[in-house]
Image: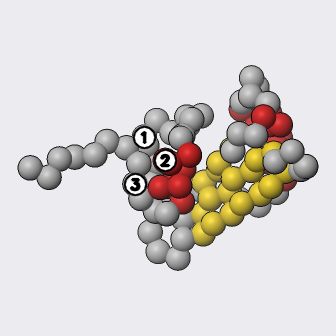
Amino acid sequence: MRKSFQGLLALVQQVFREEDPYSGSWFVFVNRRGNYVKAIAWDRTGFALYAKRLERGRFVFPSESVSQELSERSFRFLLDGIPLGKRRSLR
């Protein structure tokens, strides 16, 4: 998680070859321990870098999260520490 703007943009271009970093999409990276996340996005005037570290717990991604698109709502849940994925009934 040492990478900043240029390093993260290089990763985006390598992994998501068909995706344009200037599209306004958010690209999210999480560390191995799962307690630190960085997101980068173009906002028409430059790139914005967002970082968040949890003091307790982990960010919980769906199991198939590699190169997966998340809705804005799911992204907000993720940043709030709400696990994504299938929900179980309480019956």
Q: Position of residue 42 (x, y in %)?
A: 81, 45
Report helix, strand or loop for mark 3: loop
Type of amino acid at the residue the image marks with label 3: Pro
- Marks 3 and 2, how far apart at CA: 9 Å
Image quarter in which the N terminus is found: bottom right
Q: Residue at x 53, y 41 (%)?
A: 71
Q: Earlier in the sequence, mark 1 or mark 2?
A: 1
- Left or right? Give the position of 27 relative to 68: right
Of the pair 6 and 77, the residue shown nearer to us: 77
Q: What residue is disc 3 on?
A: 83
Q: Nearer the viewer, mark 3 or mark 2?
A: 2
Is 19 located above or below residue 32 in the figure?
Answer: above
Q: Earlier in the sequence, mark 3 or mark 2?
A: 2
For marks 1 and 2, give the CA distance. Answer: 14 Å
x%, y% of residue 79?
Answer: 54, 60
**Tag 2 residue:** 74
**CA–CA distance in space, label 3 to label 1:** 11 Å
- The 10 Å Cα crowd at callout 3, few under 14, some 14 to 19, many 20 or more, is some
Residue behind mark 1: 63
Front in this rendered view, residue 74 or 1: 74
Which amino acid lies under the numbered mark 1 shown in the image of this protein? Ser
Mark 1–mark 2 CB contact (< 8 Å): no
Q: Nearer the viewer, residue 18 or 90?
A: 90
* Mark 2 residue crowding within 10 angstroms, few (<14) / some (14–19) / many (20+): some
**Left or right of residue 79: residue 51:** right
Image point (71%, 39%), residue name: 25
Q: Residue at x 55, y 34 (%)?
A: 68
**Residue projecting furthest to the top:** 18
Question: In percent of the image, x 62 and y 59: which residue is there?
Answer: 37
**Secondary structure category for the residue under label 1:** loop
Type of amino acid at the residue the image marks with label 2: Ser
Element type at marker 2?
Answer: helix
